Structure formats: C-alpha cells, structure tokens
Amino acid sequence: MDSPATLFPAATERAPVANKIGRNAACPCGSGKKYKHCCLDERAPPQVPGFAKPVHPFPLAPRAGRGARKTLRGASFTPAAAEAISRGELQDLGLHPWIVAQLRERTGSGPGGQPPVWTIARVRAMETTALQATLARLGVQVDQVSLSEAAREEFSAWDLSLDWAHTGLDAEFLGLVACELWRRWVPQLASLEMIDEVMQDGYDSLEAGDARAACATWLDTWMLLLDALPEEGSINALDAAFGPGLNTVGNWAGDVATELRGLVRSERALGRWARAVYCAVAEHLDDRRIRRDLADLHYSLGETAEGERVLTAILHEDPDDADAYALLADALSDDAVGAYADVPRAIALLEEALARPVRNATSWGLVQRLKDLRGRGRVT
C-alpha cells in the first residue's frame, strides 16, 4: 500500500501550526518588513506558509464562463430569500455586496425586480482596456502594478474598491471591476471572491452530476482558503473571515466530506490526494470536524491503523464527547474493513461511553448504535 510519504512527500513534512505566517507578520527572511511587503509575492504556485501544497493529480477542464445561473445549490439562502436580496430587500442582514452580486447573477433580478444593470458576467466580458477607460471616466486610475500592491493589503477585492473615490451609484460597478481585475492581474494571490467562485464551481459540477469533479475542485478550494487566510486556525474562524462567501465554510466543509465519503473507496487516487490535503488542513486548523473527516478518509482507503490513531487521539483529548466513540464503533463494525472488524470491541466502546456518560450521546445516536450492534446476532 502506498504511504503518504511516498505519494505526497511535501504533504507529510510540514512545519508545526505555530510557524504559519500571516500577511501582517514580520517576514521570516529577516528584512524587517511585513511579510505582505516582502516575500509574499515570491510564492509560485501559491501555498500555505509552513507547508507545500499537495500536487494536483487530476487535470481539470477549463472552467466555463459563469453567465446567469439559476441554481442556488451551495448557497446559504432559500430561493425566496435570494430573490428578495437581489431586489434590494432584507438589507438589514448586512450581507457582503459580493454575495448580493452573486445572487443577482443567479436569479436575474436586480433592484425593484428589474434585470440588474451590472453583473459579474457583463463585467467579465469586457476587455481590460475598456474596464480601465470606464474607471478613468469615473475618476479612478488603476493599473496592474497599483492593484497588485493594493492586493497585498486586502483579502477581498470588493473591499479594495472601497478605497476608490466614487458615488453610491457607482459602488456596485466598481466592486465588480475590482474583483475582475484582481482575477486577471493577481491570479497567484486569490481574493476571497475568487475562492468563492471556485467553491461554487464545485457545486455546479455536483449539480451537473459530476461528484468527482466537484471534489477535485473543492480540494483546491481548501488549499486556497488556507493560503488566503493563514492566520485563521479553525473552521469557525474561517467562517468569520470569509465574508464574501455565498456559503459558510462550515456547511461547505460538511458537503465536501459527504461527497468524498461516497467516492473514495472506488476512486483511490482521488482518495489518496484527499488524504494529503486533509492532513494539511488538520495540521493548520484546530478543529475536530476536520480530524474526524481525515479518520474517515484513512478508513475508506483501508488504512485502519491510521484511522484508529486519529480517532483515539480525539477520544483521549476529550473522553466525555460522544463523537470518537461513535465513529470508532462504526469503523470496527464495518464489514468492509475485513479482519479489522471487531464488533465486541465496538459494543464495549459504546457501553463505556454511555456509562460515563458522555456529552452528545443523543445527537450521535449511541443508544441506537448499540442496539443495532447487539441485534446483529454476533454477540448475545
């Protein structure tokens, strides 16, 4: 069996989380400058400070132009709410304007229910010189050098446009242009809006019935998120920082794990790549959900010792939480793991958890799990 070190050596030899570098931190080269003003631009390709990006083993087809899309899959809004937001209602939600622009792109509705004047697709179809000329007429002078320099100060391209002098009527256009020019001129340093679009590309693939392409895109998304927001150390922290996201990081991460779970046992190469990425994510984020997903990947790949190691570590860190007991019992009672299966041990784990008693026993269904195992007839 291929080991992580054999397949992805860069992904298994990483500095500890404490060595991650934020944009505003002192540059490790010793220049005395902030990282964003010194060595940040030397990354090629972009990678999370502290460890290398796992090599992408699958060629992805070029992403098609977005155009007006009707699907809201992956959005944190119902269709009715999306329509209301697109029309300019529900402004008290305080949504990032990129989210509003994305919803208008999908619903085809703008203020008052009329078609939006400016859309992501319309701005994307314009030549760079035309965008610059239009900006100049609005009193905004911007070129690739100045925008690239400004991009080191901001995470959101739209937020960058807030520094450009404009009237309220021009704000939406300027925000869309800033996002598009960043995408064209600074592709090696993904803005949060670019990451959101990649995340939504995955949902589009899923909507089209291609879960494999969705997962491949989303594994890229994980690395882009960590690269753009290296100072955020948990999924909740990423959620708070990912203001322009049409979906929350937490909900999206759950969708990624669900789709991977359905593919990994048959798509072994995808599974090994996913395992490398999740090793990187688990090292960077202090989050039990990610480590549980990593354990699931190990088990799906037949790496039972590694899967148990991850779950046992979670259990030892907090023996009063039900999650590791439930997941370890599931793995031990899975017929697909062959000789590793040990139903009596799984039953003993659940009994131990219920006897403590642990938190979250009901939400993890420990009683039902125990009942089902005892009913399998292997243990009386």
Image (tube, grey):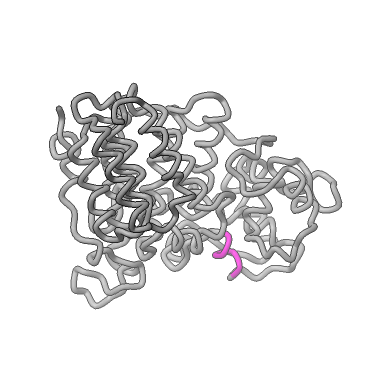
Position in image of residue 32 (x %, y %): 24, 78
* Residue shown at the point (51%, 58%) measured from the top left: 242
Q: Which residue is the extreme one toward the top?
A: 266
- In the image, 68 versus 278, the foreground residue is 278
Q: Up-down: is 20 above or below 109?
A: below
Position in image of residue 306 (x %, y %): 20, 41
Q: Up-down: is 73 above or below 361?
A: above
Q: Is residue 341 left or right of residue 374?
A: left
Position in image of residue 271 (x %, y %): 31, 31
- In the image, 276 versus 156, the foreground residue is 276
Task: Quadrant for the C terminus, please.
Answer: top left
Q: Is residue 7 left or right of residue 357?
A: left
* Figure quadrant of residue 30: bottom left
- In the image, 313 versus 95, the foreground residue is 313
* Residue shown at the point (30%, 42%) measured from the top left: 328
Q: Is residue 171 magenta?
A: no
* Residue shown at the point (81%, 44%) measured from the top left: 115
Q: Is residue 161 magenta?
A: yes
The span shown in magenta is 158-162
Q: Which residue is the extreme one toward the front?
A: 380
Task: Quadrant for the N terminus, please.
Answer: top left
**Main SS class of the magenta portion in the image:** helix
